[in-house]
């Protein structure tokens, strides 16, 4: 009977320790989410995301956020409090609403326009425009009005010298 009581007691302690570890890991993950979402508001204006900042202000802020999380506030509520206190500049990423949406859309649009412009430039440099003349059978080959280019002739001369 005593063995069974000891086994039950050991299992209960292990179970409670496991629950405490899971809760601690969850609280750490919530704090990390909060630190990733907010910028450090230190006096020297380091401009770092809170999770990457090592100044004394960031340590104090982490302690304050830990207390707020322990008091039952959610990550979103704490973020909202910080936005109300410091403005949207405290956010590490702009919101996806209103004018801030341009910060998400413009980089992708610029990449698209730049890629299309680069393609057009390369086509112009390589002479692959649609304005070239078509071959007699309409095979799509372009015929140069000046005959073979100087590079084609130079290549042919080099090849002829190698065959000798």
Image (cartoon, rainbow, N blue to C red):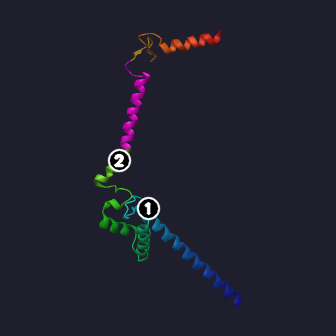
> Which range of residues does the magenta coloring cover?
108-131
Residue 132: image tag: none
User: Residue at image x 48%, y 71%?
Assistant: 27
User: Residue at image x 39%, y 34%?
Assistant: 116
Tell which of 148 and 142 is nearer to you: 148
Tell me the crowding category of disc 2: few under 14, some 14 to 19, or many 20 or more residues within 10 angstroms, Cα based: few
Q: Which is more foreground, mark 2 or mark 1?
A: 1
Horizontal and vertical percent position of residue 21: 56, 74
**Residue 91 in the image: above or below residue 133:** below
Residue 36: image tag: 1
Q: How many marks?
A: 2
Tell which of 69 and 48 is nearer to you: 48
Assess whether mark 1 and mark 2 are in contact (beta carbons under 8 angstroms): no
Query: Along the polypeptide, which appears first: circle 2 or circle 1?
Result: 1
- Residue topped by disc 2: 105
Horizontal and vertical percent position of residue 130: 38, 21
Residue 43, by quadrant, is: bottom left
Q: Is residue 25 magenta?
A: no
Horizontal and vertical percent position of residue 143: 44, 13
Q: From the image, which quarter does the N terminus lie in?
A: bottom right
């Amino acid at each position: 009977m005593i063995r069974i009581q000891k086994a039950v007691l050991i299992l209960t302690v292990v179970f409670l320790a496991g629950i405490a570890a899971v809760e601690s890991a969850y609280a750490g993950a919530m704090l990390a989410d909060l630190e990733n979402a907010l910028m450090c508001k230190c006096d020297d204006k380091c401009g770092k995301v809170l999770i990457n900042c090592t100044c004394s202000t960031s340590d104090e802020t982490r302690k304050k956020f830990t207390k707020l999380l322990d008091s039952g506030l959610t990550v979103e509520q704490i973020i909202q409090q910080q936005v109300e206190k410091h403005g949207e500049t405290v956010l590490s990423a702009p919101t996806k609403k209103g004018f801030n949406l341009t910060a998400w859309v413009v980089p992708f649009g610029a990449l698209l326009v730049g890629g299309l412009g680069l393609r057009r430039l390369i086509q112009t440099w390589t002479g692959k425009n649609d304005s070239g003349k078509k071959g007699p059978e309409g095979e799509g080959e372009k015929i140069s009005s000046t005959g073979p280019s100087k590079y084609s002739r130079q290549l042919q001369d080099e090849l002829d010298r190698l065959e000798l």
